[in-house]
Image (spheres, rainbow, N blue to C red):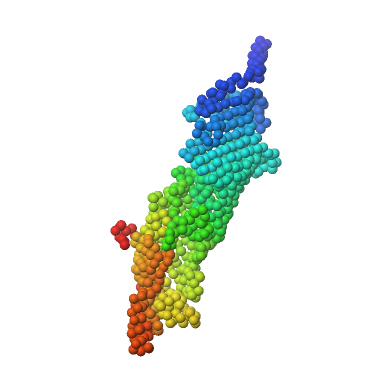
Amino acid sequence: MKKNSKALKISGAILAAIVGLLILFALFDWNMLRPYINRKVSETTGREFAIQGNLDVKFHRGLDSETGWRRYVPRPYVSVEDIRMSNPAWSTVGNQMATAKRVDVGFRILPLLGKEFVITDLRLAEPNVALQRRKDGSNSWTLKDNGPSEWEVDIQRLAFSTGRLRYLDEAIDLDLRADAKSINGNTTPAAPGAQPYGLAFTLSGKYNKAPVTGGGKAGAVLTLTGSDIKFPVEANADIGGNKISVKGTLDDPKTLSGMDLQLKLAGPSMADLYPLTGVLLPETPPYSTHGRLLGEKNDADAWTFTYQKFSGKVGASDIAGTLSYSQRKPRALLRGELTSQQLRLADLGPSVGADTGAGTKQAGKVKAPPAGKALPVDEFDTSKWGALDADVKFTGKRIVRTNDIPLQDIVADLHMKDKVLRLTPLQFGMAGGQVISNISLDGRQKAIDAQARVAARHLKINRLFPKLESMRGSFGEINGDAALAGKGNTVASMLASSNGEMNAVVTEGSVSKFVLELAGLNVANAVFVKVFGDKQINMNCLAAEAAVRNGRANVQRFVLDTDEAVVDVSGYVDLAQEQLNLDVRPKTKGTRIFSLRTPLYAKGTFADPDVGPYKGPLALKAGAAVALAAVSPLAAVLPLVNVSKVPDTNCKAAIAEAEKKPQVRELPKSVGKK
């Protein structure tokens, strides 16, 4: 009885103490603590903090969403009105970093003994947040560093009705504003297992001085406890001309461990996405794409994003496939496979330093070659090559080059590692044959080190000149090889400094007689062919070799042997100056009437070539004809009659010599000086 009486007294005392504390909590004027709280928080954060309205503490039962005994344990709810925290003095987005008309905080008491502040419920009324990041990377939301804290803060549930956000990022020239308000929750979840929508928001502002507009909706309550939580989001925005639309869910929003979104993108150029995504993409004409975006965070807090089974268009080109972007050190990795039914080089030309058509000429992104020049002068931009590594395979059915021969069945394996870009291989069908190449561009130095090895096989002569009427009846195949190395940041500068070798052979075939007659200046036959029609001339062989030294391609061999003529070419092509200096010497195999039989020249620039007969030999023949005409009118014809016969070319030997594999040669600086 005494023991029971003592226990009852202790229990009564504890109950009385609890009741007393509750009464004390209920009657205590908590506003007396506001000056102390304001001062303590300001000292800790290094920012001016103020509770300007009423401060109150009440006890409530736990949340209905909680399980077990915790939902029945009363816990304190702190309510403060008119709360604000200042921005640093340098901020230009406003004096206050954060304000709220009212903040309600529910927390557990027992974890406080272990220096753990467990916030079970955080509710904000009309929050207003203004954040800023400067060009040097400093920002307004990083508070005073007081060293490691002994306290841990755990927020389990966040909710607010209406609010505003402004974010100014000088590094990417973005000034974004968002306004949110409550809406009636949609009874149909955004995705299986996701909570209904409860907030609607609008977006406005500027990006790169272009307007930003958009809006969307999301869940009203951000549940930050448990696993497999799916937070719904649906949004669309126009940012700097790039239209972005997403719909789906975010996984475990407390740590944001993943996402599953339907993503649509469209804009004037894919390169404009770099400031927003950090993914290096080429300059392109207008693009649009849609697919599924999956995101997953690993244990090292690094993300892998997969754009799965997407399809879209870039200019007049179609593109589809799957790309994966993984955050890693020292560089991110982009990998995947892309396919296309039709791809225009005019849509991707600037990414490889080439002006390939009007499809990319916008906003001054493509340079026109200087006056009198023909080679591409657009620069490779290697400044961002170190942003990521890449392993991407591209296959295409057809590539269209503006006003040129289309390419078919393209396969390109692109590899980027430590600012070295390799296409190994780059192969495609062309003119009924195939071209296989291996290209390396080393961007680690100021001037790119470029190497290229190219092999062309079974190119059909008549399909190389689809718009030349006189070549349509021709047949035969061309095979060739080239190996070149150069330095520079444009195609023009790489060729201007290049060293290497090139060759080409044609074993058998036929070419237009009219073309050969013009090459030999057989005037009578040329006129006859133009009046009565062209015919094909059998070609026994063609063999060509050139050695490239410091940008000058010296013709070591060029011979064209047909049933009716042999044509030799000598001289050089200056890739640095874009100049031609070639001699073309035709020799007929039979008698020709009115054959001028004079050598031709090909001079001038690539952009404005000058092709014609040497005037000296023509003048001598004309003088001889005039002199003989004084003796007899018929004798005047004799200087124009060709009765010589040039021997056949040893085609087998010429082709064997030309088919030697070309080599890239590293030459001393003194070699090849002009």
Give the camera-side residue of 245 and 187. Answer: 245
* Image location of residue 491, percent across then percent down: 42, 58
Give the camera-side residue of 418 and 203. Answer: 203
In this view, 610 is above or below 9: below
* Image location of residue 597, percent across then percent down: 37, 79
In this view, 451 is above or below 305: below
Is 600 left or right of 41, judged from the image as shown? left
* Image location of residue 499, percent across then percent down: 36, 60
Is 261 left or right of 531, judged from the image as shown? right
Give the camera-side residue of 361 and 644. Answer: 361
**Corner quadrant of residue 582:** bottom left
Residue at screen point 64% across, 32% down: 125
Q: Quadrant of the N terminus?
A: top right
In this view, 535 is above or below 178: below
Q: Quadrant of the C terminus?
A: bottom left
* Image location of residue 590, percent across then percent down: 38, 83
In this view, 124 is above or below 472: above
Furthest-left residue in this view? 670
Residue at screen point 34% across, 61% down: 549
**Corner quadrant of residue 643:** bottom left
Give the camera-side residue of 668 and 369. Answer: 369
Say if residue 177 shows up in the picture.
Answer: yes
Residue at screen point 59% across, 20% down: 33
**Corner quadrant of residue 626:** bottom left
Furthest-front residue in this view? 630
Residue at screen point 48% across, 67% down: 433
How many numbered discs sit on the rendered protein? 0
Say if residue 394 shows up in the picture.
Answer: no
